[in-house]
Image (cartoon, rainbow, N blue to C red):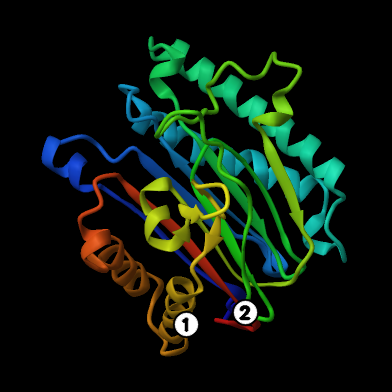
Amino acid sequence: MAKKKQKLWVVVGDSVMGLNHVKNNIPCQDSHLYEEMENGWGIAIVADGAGSADYSHQGSQFVVKEGMSLFKKIVTENKWTTSKKLPEQAKWHKLAKTNLKQLRNMLAKEAEQTKKELGQLASTIMVAIFSPLGILCTHIGDGRGGYSNSEGEWKPLFTPWKGEYANETIFLTSDIWADKEVDKFVESKVINEKPFAFTLMSDGLEMHSFECSVWDEKEEKYYDPNRPYQKFFNPVVNGLVQMKQSRMTDDEIKGKWNKFLREGNEKIKNEPDDKTMIIGAYFPNGTS
């Protein structure tokens, strides 16, 4: 009998329709995908389709599916799963940016083949490559990402791109790739802290789980500290760990997670926007 592969992470994620989409019969424009590889490495991707784009739900689905293939190829070709250290920042940023540009070109080809305008498939993208050594992340647009180090301190993975006006952001499909200042729009980071947990989410959940708007008395204006709420994430992660330790199946855990995203509390339940969150916790001794 073949030995079952040991998993070093427990990861769960889902995408559910927001209240406005339910009321107006609009498809969920969020998509997500996550996959664990060998030696405790894995990839998580979240994409949020533009609310103003007719086929953005198809765009976000394409982005997570094809994005997963591209980023898995990077990990495999560079043999990171057997390496003792993470890549340098410059190398990771170059690889991530090349991948994202290729993904954008693939989406443009998909638009052409399906006789759609590229802008009709507009979507953001957030990627986290997680490992026992640390996390590699990259993103275009808004949404949030965070991680907890071994001391239990929650920190942001990246800074969401916000425009001058409310709900303004950029997308993978935006006209940024010919710009000499493309690095203003594509952010990549190497997190060289051993993680205990991580999260990626669309902006439909940010107000419920991050400090996003705090009044600055001195400047007399609101600012965004981009801080994950420990009081939100610690119970969620502890609950996830306990469910795994109690031998719940992945499907059972996913069912609980779906219910939480739909009706976890009154604010989450009544959120008008689509809601996606992936969360993972590290098991140093592994699970079966």
Q: What residue lies at 46% left-to-right and 10% top-to-bottom?
A: 112
Residue 266 in percent (x, y) is at 21, 65
Label 2 crowd (10 A; few <14 / some 14-19 / many >=20): few
Q: Position of residue 25 (x, y in %)?
A: 14, 36
**Secondary-structure class at tag 2:** loop
Q: Is residue 190 above or below residue 74?
A: below
Rendered position, 77 above or below 25: below
User: Please, which residue is most extreme toward the bottom here?
Assistant: 246
Q: Amino acid at mark 2?
A: Gly
Pointer 2: what residue? Answer: 152
Most foreground residue, 24 or 268: 268
Q: CA distance from mark 2 to mark 1?
A: 11 Å
Q: Is residue 170 left or right of residue 206?
A: right
Residue linked to disc 1: 238
Q: Which residue occupies 33% across, 30% down?
A: 51
Quadrant for residue 97, please give it.
Answer: top right
User: Can you say whether 175 is above or below 28 in the image?
Assistant: above
**Residue 5 visible somewhere in the drawing:** no
